[in-house]
Image (cartoon, grey):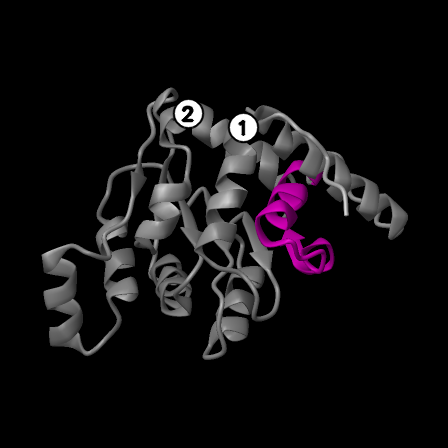
């Protein structure tokens, strides 16, 4: 068995080259503007099925870039995604990443109401007077609450990244976002996760 000798700085580039080569060999024809996002998600997961299951609303990448350059903030449903998103690049345009899941007021209100902290976190986000991108990688209840807040005209997001992972209400919650009018990136089915949500954000931030 032999190993390639690759400089640490070149590993990611080499991985991306391998992914794009294999996508071509599979006969996948991915639009140029979507390719960085799909490749980065596959790089994060080593799962080529994402090339088939990721759904993008019209011009969503360009809309997201424009929003970030105009100072949009990102709200996520896990501290893992918060940690993974490139905050320095976002800050350069005036934005921040927010996660309210560990806030004491969120936990207290969720317990009082008998709902998830993720749902209450979306209520707290709706109170921000900011242009918001939602990056949801864990909690379908967050997506359901976002949908409800939009219907109630209490929230008007720039974009929704809907990639929670799991088995309970995950598929149904993603379909709510697919059926809405807010620009979206959604991974259909059960797959996703916080690392996928962060990867999607970074694929946009690294290509501004």
Asked if 93 appears above or below 12 in the picture, the reply is above
Mark 1 highlights which residue? 206
Q: Quadrant of the C terminus?
A: top right
Crowd around label 1: few <14 · some 14–19 · many ≥20 (10 Å): few
Q: Quadrant of residue 2?
A: top right
Question: Residue 31, can we see it?
Answer: no
- The percent position of residue 127, horizontal first and vertical second, equals 22, 48
Q: CA distance from mark 1 to mark 2?
A: 8 Å
- In the picture provided, is 82 more to the left or to the right than 25? left
- The percent position of residue 97, horizontal first and vertical second, equals 32, 39
Which stretch did the figure color magenta? 35-56
Question: Residue 153, can we see it?
Answer: yes
Residue 176 vs residue 192, the one in the foreground: 192
Residue 27 vs residue 18, the one in the foreground: 18
| Residue 58 disc label | none
Q: Residue at x 69, y 37 (%)?
A: 16
Asked if 169 appears above or below 66 in the picture, the reply is below
Q: Residue at x 34, y 29 (%)?
A: 95
- The kind of secondary structure element at disc 1 is loop
Q: Residue at x 77, y 48 (%)?
A: 1
**Along the polypeptide, which appears first: circle 1 or circle 2?**
2
Crowd around label 2: few <14 · some 14–19 · many ≥20 (10 Å): some
Q: Quadrant of residue 102?
A: bottom left
- The percent position of residue 21, horizontal first and vertical second, equals 82, 41
| Residue 89 disc label | 2
Q: Are marks 1 and 2 in contact (CB under 8 Å)?
A: yes
């Amino acid at each position: 068995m032999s190993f390639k000798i690759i400089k640490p700085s070149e590993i990611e580039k080499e991985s991306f080259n391998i992914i794009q080569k294999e996508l071509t060999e599979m006969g996948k024809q991915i639009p140029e503007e979507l390719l960085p996002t799909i490749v980065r998600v596959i790089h994060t997961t080593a799962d080529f099925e994402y090339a088939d299951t990721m759904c993008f609303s019209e011009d969503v990448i360009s809309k997201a870039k424009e929003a970030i350059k105009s100072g949009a903030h990102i709200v996520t449903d896990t501290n893992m995604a918060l940690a993974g998103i490139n905050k320095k690049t976002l800050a350069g345009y005036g934005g921040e990443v927010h996660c309210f899941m560990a806030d004491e007021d969120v936990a207290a209100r969720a317990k009082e109401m008998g709902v998830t902290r993720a749902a209450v976190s979306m209520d707290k986000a709706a109170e921000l007077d900011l242009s918001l991108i939602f990056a949801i990688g864990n909690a379908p209840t967050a997506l359901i609450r976002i949908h409800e807040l939009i219907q109630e005209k209490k929230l008007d997001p720039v974009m929704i990244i809907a990639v929670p992972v799991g088995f309970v209400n995950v598929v149904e919650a993603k379909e709510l976002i697919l059926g809405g009018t807010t620009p979206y990136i959604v991974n259909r089915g059960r797959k996703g996760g916080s690392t996928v949500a962060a990867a999607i954000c970074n694929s946009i931030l690294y290509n501004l």
